[in-house]
């Protein structure tokens, strides 16, 4: 019997992909699937059977799943609005949790996850995977070797436009509906999806970008200020969307961060990373990913004592030829297996996952504060230290 029997909760595109990744680890076995939409659930059960030959038990209620099945871990890939309550429920029922990014949209939910994980002693990890693109592994190694000098600035953006986002869910079947006409808001058969709510504050998706940057700079974000465009889309007309939000942050290692997020205006892709872009500046070196498909990753090395220096194309890639085939063939340019592997290692060997409880919440809280700051006209806000959550879990 596999050591870690796992149930998948939430079977949209990301949850279904996650179920496939878990099957690649011999220490793990997927034992059940759960989605509150019966049609989504049945499609996922069929797809899993086609690829693995195994028909799994399926559930439309997580309570029923927990009552009926014996398992050790859950992979949760639902709306970030419901992920916290599902994670807390799973932790309180003694399960380890790998939760998709972003793990929460409110400070109260972060506190509840922290408290439940500490009380239960179970592993909680976040599925942020882009931090394991090969170039981030390379930049972390450069920092370890001192090649950046003192890092003082980190910037990133996630600007992911789709002309036909799934802004609605079919009320009867729970399946996603890709319609963008404002008149759909009056259709009684459709309910707004979590994405349509997210797009009022796209900066809530900041953990996906901040996590990788923090993995290079280290430290904890202490202050945040954020501005956004008006809450009314310029392309998605008559939707209460902010087309772009930009957060400026400071960490406890004197690094200034700038992170942008937006989903509702086109920006053009970057080579390899699509909608993602990053830059790190240090006293000895600046590195940045390609800004467009015409561009390459590059580095700037100053000539000490002058205002001059040299820009060079940099050999940066998403996955390395020496990464094994399983890694290279996983989603998001070969990054998707990393969070699953580190989650399983933390459970089996106690090796702390780089996206475990503390780093997961440290990349999430600044996003929540940034959305609040944007709402309050850019007010500078302090990000709570997780040690302030300890009180609540000891009580
Ligand atoms: N790591 C990444 O790169 C990445 C990429 C895409 C999405 N995501 C994250 O993955 C998550 C899911 O994304 P998606 O695109 O698959 O979303 P989705 O909305 O298409 O799918 C979510 C599924 O969860 C189900 N669900 C909602 N509440 C439930 C509940 N209480 N019990 C059981 N099922 C429930 C819905 O019916 C739906 O089928 C989100 O948190 C998203 O941010 C991460």
Image (cartoon, rainbow, N blue to C red):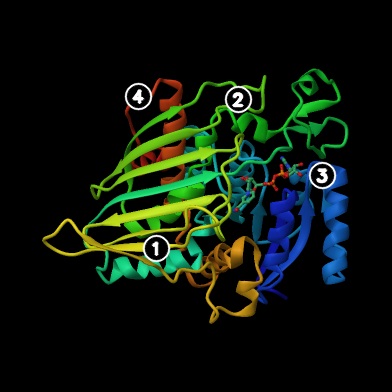
Using the rendered view, name the quadrant where residue 264 is placed. Answer: top right
Q: CA distance from mark 1 to mark 3?
A: 48 Å
Q: Earlier in the sequence, mark 1 or mark 4?
A: 1
Name the foreground residue: 376 vs 25. Answer: 376
Characterize the local packing of mark 2: few (<14), some (14-19) or many (20 or more) Cα atoms within 10 angstroms: some
Q: CA distance from mark 2 to mark 3?
A: 38 Å
Q: CA distance from mark 1 to mark 4?
A: 34 Å
Name the foreground residue: 134 vs 270. Answer: 270
* Image spot of residue 4 (x, y percent): 65, 68
Q: Are marks 4 and 2 in contact (CB under 8 Å)?
A: no
Q: Earlier in the sequence, mark 1 or mark 2?
A: 2
Q: In front of the other: label 4 or label 3?
A: 4
Q: Is mark 3 within 8 Å of ligand 1?
A: yes
* Image spot of residue 211 (x, y percent): 45, 52
Left or right: 171 as drawn, with respect to 126 = right
Q: Earlier in the sequence, mark 4 or mark 3?
A: 3
Residue 16, above or below 80: below
* Image spot of residue 349 (x, y percent): 50, 72
Q: Which residue is mark 2?
A: 234
Q: Which residue is mark 3?
A: 60
Badge number at residue 379: 4
Q: CA distance from mark 4 to mark 2?
A: 24 Å
Residue 45, above or below 374: below
Instruction: Tell me the element at label 4.
Output: loop
Badge number at residue 321: none
Left or right: 315 as drawn, with respect to 173 = left
């Amino acid at each position: 019997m596999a050591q870690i029997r796992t149930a998948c909760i939430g079977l949209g595109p990301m949850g279904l992909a996650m179920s496939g990744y878990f099957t690649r680890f011999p220490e793990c076995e997927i034992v059940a699937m759960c989605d509150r939409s019966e049609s989504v659930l049945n499609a996922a059960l069929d797809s899993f059977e086609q690829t693995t030959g195994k028909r799994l038990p399926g559930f439309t209620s997580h309570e029923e799943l927990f009552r009926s099945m014996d398992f050790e871990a859950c992979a949760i890939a639902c709306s970030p609005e419901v992920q916290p309550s599902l994670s807390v429920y799973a932790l309180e029922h003694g399960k380890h949790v790998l939760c998709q990014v972003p793990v929460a949209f409110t400070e109260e939910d972060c506190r509840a996850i922290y408290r439940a994980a500490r009380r239960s002693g179970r592993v909680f990890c976040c599925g942020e995977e882009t931090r394991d693109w090969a170039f981030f592994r390379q930049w972390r190694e450069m920092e370890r070797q001192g090649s950046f000098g003192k890092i003082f600035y980190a910037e990133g953006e996630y600007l992911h436009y789709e002309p036909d986002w799934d802004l609605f869910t079919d009320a009867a079947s729970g399946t996603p509906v890709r319609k963008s006409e404002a008149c759909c808001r009056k259709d009684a058969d459709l309910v707004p999806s979590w994405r349509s709510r997210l797009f009022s504050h796209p900066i809530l998706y900041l953990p996906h970008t901040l996590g990788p940057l923090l993995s290079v700079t280290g430290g904890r974000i202490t202050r945040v200020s954020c501005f956004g465009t008006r809450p009314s889309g310029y392309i998605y007309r008559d939707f209460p969307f902010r087309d772009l939000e930009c957060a400026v942050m400071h960490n406890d290692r004197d690094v200034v961060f700038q992170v942008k997020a937006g989903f509702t205006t086109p920006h053009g892709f970057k080579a390899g990373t699509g909608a993602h872009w990053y830059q790190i500046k240090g006293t000895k070196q600046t590195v940045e990913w390609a800004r467009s498909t015409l561009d390459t990753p590059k580095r700037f090395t100053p000539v000490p004592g002058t205002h001059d220096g040299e820009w060079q194309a940099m050999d940066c890639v998403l996955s390395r030829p020496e990464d094994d085939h399983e890694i290279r063939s996983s989603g998001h340019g070969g990054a998707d297996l990393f969070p699953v592997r580190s989650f399983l290692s933390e459970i089996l060997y106690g090796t702390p996952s780089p996206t475990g409880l503390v780093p997961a919440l440290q990349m999430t809280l600044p996003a929540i504060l940034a959305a609040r700051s944007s709402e309050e006209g850019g007010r500078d806000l302090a990000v709570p230290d997780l040690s302030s959550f300890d009180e609540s879990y000891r009580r």
